Image (cartoon, rainbow, N blue to C red):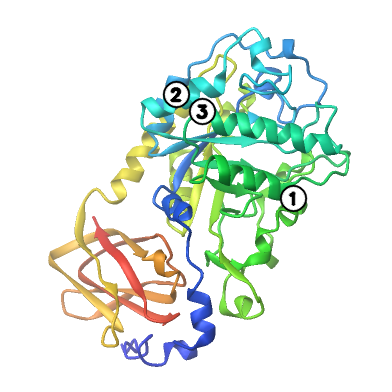
Amino acid sequence: MDYCFDKNWTTDNNNAALEGAEVERYISAVPSKRQLAAASKPFYAFVHFGMNTATGREWGSGKETVSQFDIEKINPAQWVTAIKASGATGIILTCKHHDGFCLWNTAATDFNVMNSKLKTDIVKLLSKECAAQGMDFGVYLSPWDMHDSRYGKSEYNDYFCEQLTELLTGYGKIFEVWFDGAKGRDAVDFEYDWERYYKLVRELQPDANIAICGPDIRWIGNEAGKTRNSEFSVVPSYLRDAEKTSEKSQHGEDEAGRLLKLDSKDEDLGSRSVLSKSADICWYPAEVDVSIRKGWFYSPKGNITVKSVRKLFNIYLTSVGNNCSLLLNIPPDKKGVIHKKEVKTLKRLGRMIASVTAEPVLTAQPGKLSKDEGFLDFDFKEKSRIKYAVISEDITQSQRVEVFELFIKKADGTFKPVYKGTNIGSKKIIKIGESCTGIRFIIRQSRSAPIIKEIGFYK
């Protein structure tokens, strides 16, 4: 069968412009140093722990008292060990959720863990344990605060910045600062001073990425672990507008179900047709946030909802393996430990992730392709069953590939198509599951010459 291998990026480029001012504009959007560092560590964990753990709620009421945080012991070493076993490289802690209760020794409010039975700076314990076990540490600080009387007044921004300063100066290096736009329907109409918050992060932790209401990492748009078919990192700059993120975020405890579905109108964020209508574009990669169980905080009722290792692995393949980062929430229980069911699941997940690249058949670093490389052939020393192909672009030169295909080469020299995709970006993991003597990789459409950092085929 004729698969038209002569129709590729070096010839007709799928009827799209290969070069020119507009293409140069697209590929001028590249990651910052901090975004590049994040792309090299695309899987990390959320730890939701706090007042809601003690009260058994997802969202607080703002009327809680310190005495209701009745947790008497915690084991951060167990948290880090369990999470590290999954293959995750960092942990982001909910230092203050919407209820306003603070998990560190803050001078900004008495509503904090030091005045509870625990009398322990949880942020300090966890940040030290992360450092001891070679894990990155990040902080979540809820802009919405149900408890504090300053919320809704101009002085609240001062209060928030005081808290942010404490977290960014007293707990070592921070790899990510996580802000969300969640706000209750009855919350006071209040404008956060986002630019002031961002400036503070840049001054105190210049290497930290700011997500999700932030300029460095964007929200995927749902909490179900779903991604788009084409997940571009080069998108219109207006997507960085934190207030737009806030409008689409959760505005009530009962809205969690709504966030389990993608909004179809947002399916295309980075194609040429979208970028051509956007005067300003930027590098703004997506992060997938999803919980290992129903709900973000631990509840005994949620034990039966813990996702299977197969489900989690598929989320990994379609997030990390689809040009996104993955933020997997693992909430400790009231005893201060991660439940044994999650511990077992995380360990198995880590083994499955490691297995993807454990048995390489062939790896290569093609670099920038030339005009005689419309397709690349990779011949194996012997017939092999290929389970996965893993491809990465050199994203320091932007995201260029727009359409590509993989064909397996049979023993008789003929080819069989096994995959057709669009963008690649920082990483594309493709399931193949076929025996072959080689693989042909053909790029049909690209923004200027493709630059392939690495391609590998694994048993």
Q: Are marks 3 and 1 in contact (CB under 8 Å)?
A: no
Q: Within the image, what quadrant is residue 185 found in?
A: top right
Q: Within the image, what quadrant is residue 297 found in?
A: top right
Q: Earlier in the sequence, mark 3 or mark 2?
A: 2
Amino acid residing under circle 2: Lys
Element marked by disc 2: helix
Amino acid residing under circle 3: Tyr
Q: Which residue position is annotated with label 2?
A: 128
Residue 35 falls left or right of residue 65:
left
Element marked by disc 1: helix
Q: Is residue 29 visible?
A: yes
Q: Residues within 10 Å of mark 2 (few under 14, many from 20)?
A: some
Q: Which residue position is annotated with label 1?
A: 246
Check the image and report above or below for 408 versus 24.
above
Residue located at (77% from left, 32% from top): 145
**Which quarter of the rendering shows the C terminus?**
bottom left
Q: Which residue position is annotated with label 3?
A: 171
